[in-house]
Amino acid sequence: MEDINKFRHEPYFHSVKLNHDLCKGCTSCLKRCPTEAIRVRNGKAKIIKERCIDCGECIRVCPYHAKIAVTNSLDNLKNFKYNIALPAPSFYGQFRNINDINVILTAFKKIGFDDVFEVTVGAELITKTTLKLLETGKLKKPVINSACPAIIRLIQQRYPDLIENILPLKAPVEIAASVARNKAVKDTGFSQNEIGVFFISPCAAKMTTIINPIGSETSNIDAVLSMKDVVNEMAPFIHKIKNIEFTTASDSAGIVWANSGGEIKALSEYNCISVDGIHNVYKVLEDVEDEKLGDIDFVECSACLSGCVGGPLTVENPYIAKAKIRELAKKYNIDTRPVNYETDMFLDKEIEETPLTKLGSSISETISLMEKINKLHESLPQLDCASCGAPSCNALAEDIVRGFGKESDCIIKLKEKIKLISDEIQELD
Amino acid sequence: MDNNTLNIRYEVVAKDFSRAGEASSALKKVLRKLNISPDIIRKVSIPMYEAEINMVIHANGGYIDVDITPETIHVVLTDNGPGIADLELAMQEGYSTATDNVRELGFGAGMGLPNIKKYSDDMKITTQLGKGTTVEIFVNIPA
């Protein structure tokens, strides 16, 4: 059985990993990576750990399925006496013909869980607290949501001065996890450690976050299961479920968090925008930094197109899933139960900057290195073909100056050189 | 003291609003690589963006030269546009000669030149009617 703690506090741990045997060394992931975190070296993709933000773009685009997300397996249920499943809101969008959330919750019991606690409840609690915080007028505008870990990592790495704009609340799953664990202790009499809290995740970034939490010392989640794995597990029997064993606590306000635009839905009295897709988020954060957005109160960012339903570990077509979520939100639009769990929702640790390795040790040195990079870049073909193993000619130029590459990595340069040599040889004849 | 200088030139295309701001974004990336702090970067990128937009709106484009030394960032925006008739008036907040078309796009609020002055450490404008305008932006890099 795998040891679920084996990665805990591994510095620069990433859930996104490479399957060496499957990688052909093509340039698909390289060109798509938003932080230029991938190089192809010796015919295989290599992830630069300090640059990777676990957005999962590479998992999505790899034609050979060589990029994988490390998650835990259902075997881990054996490690605990009492197991609770925490399905992300996007999970409800994965089953095309199921319109009853209670059926989905019951399916968790069939695959070995003792209880289910819905992440939608955590989302709803955040929505309510966000409204209160916005009312105080004390948050730095525009407020940036804290729920998408890939975005937070992007901000830590590229936009450190926007850290203070991040909503100071934990992610819905962390809130759900601590409420669920405390509730289970009370209900069952088991100790904290005997209870297993499993998050059913649409993405790799969440896995990374339980290993290296952002804004808190430790995570309350014991293991992360890939949504895909759980859907596969449930697919054979979920349509046959007759006896409902759970009643959902979800309300539309929490369910819609699965979709982009879901978090800001309840903030309608404020001026909000929702941005999905990591490349789009990049541009908008750039504008936030330049104060170009004007009077925007809240920016909801999600790394995945369509929001969490577009996560790399989901199964259903994200557009179908999005429609499904909207349908469910309509159906469960009945705020009948009070959501008044007592739990600390605020981040308990400052979010730190994680700047990239500096080019030079002083501005002066960096300026001369930048001049070198610019000159090298001009001498390169500027096709950005990525055949050298770097995502662009500029990235290769920087790699060369940093000592991680050489000019002959450029196949066009190499071809020119070979031609020169062969011409010379012919002259000798 | 060393004479290390990084020179970069950007071209600005007239009337192309979808490309307006490209140069200031590109410069931002360079300044970030130089490890210049975000608040100093903003002092350059916001006024440069304003000046760049001015070039797109009023001046038929032009070019931007940036010189970066370990102590200062110096941005020179040169155009061959119509020049500014009344510089004092142009420096007033809210004054603009932008057409309604341009205002529809969310530009032309009359904050361009005032913002350049507000954000940068120093600025200089030389203008000649019918010849063109040069806007210089100076920002100091604290040691």
Image (cartoon, helix red, strand yellow):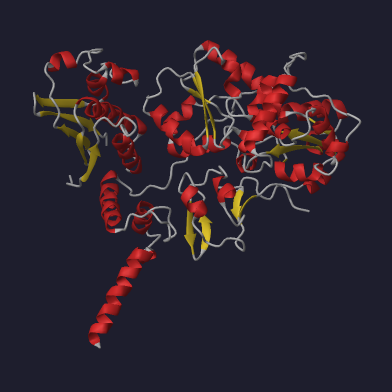
How many numbered discs sit on the rendered protein?
A: 0
- In the rendering, at what x and y percent does residue A48 appear? 49, 52
Farthest residue to the front: give it: B101
The front one of A10 and A329 is A329
Compared with B69, B140 (above or below) is above
**Looking at the image, can residue A121 be seen?**
no
Left or right: A332 with respect to A243? left
Left or right: residue A254 versus residue A110 is left
Q: Quarter of the image holding residue A413?
A: bottom left
- Identify the residue at image location x=59%, y=49%: A59
x and y percent of residue A74 in the render? 78, 46
Instruction: State whether residue A216 is above or below residue B3.
Output: above
Q: Quadrant of residue B64?
A: top left
Please say if A142 is above or below B28.
above
Left/right placement of residue A14 relative to residue B138 reads right
Residue B17 in sight here: yes
Residue drawn where x is 56% and y is 44% of the image: A54
Left or right: B58 as drawn, with respect to A136? left
The location of residue A291, given as percent across then percent down, is 37, 24
Farthest residue in the right direction? A243
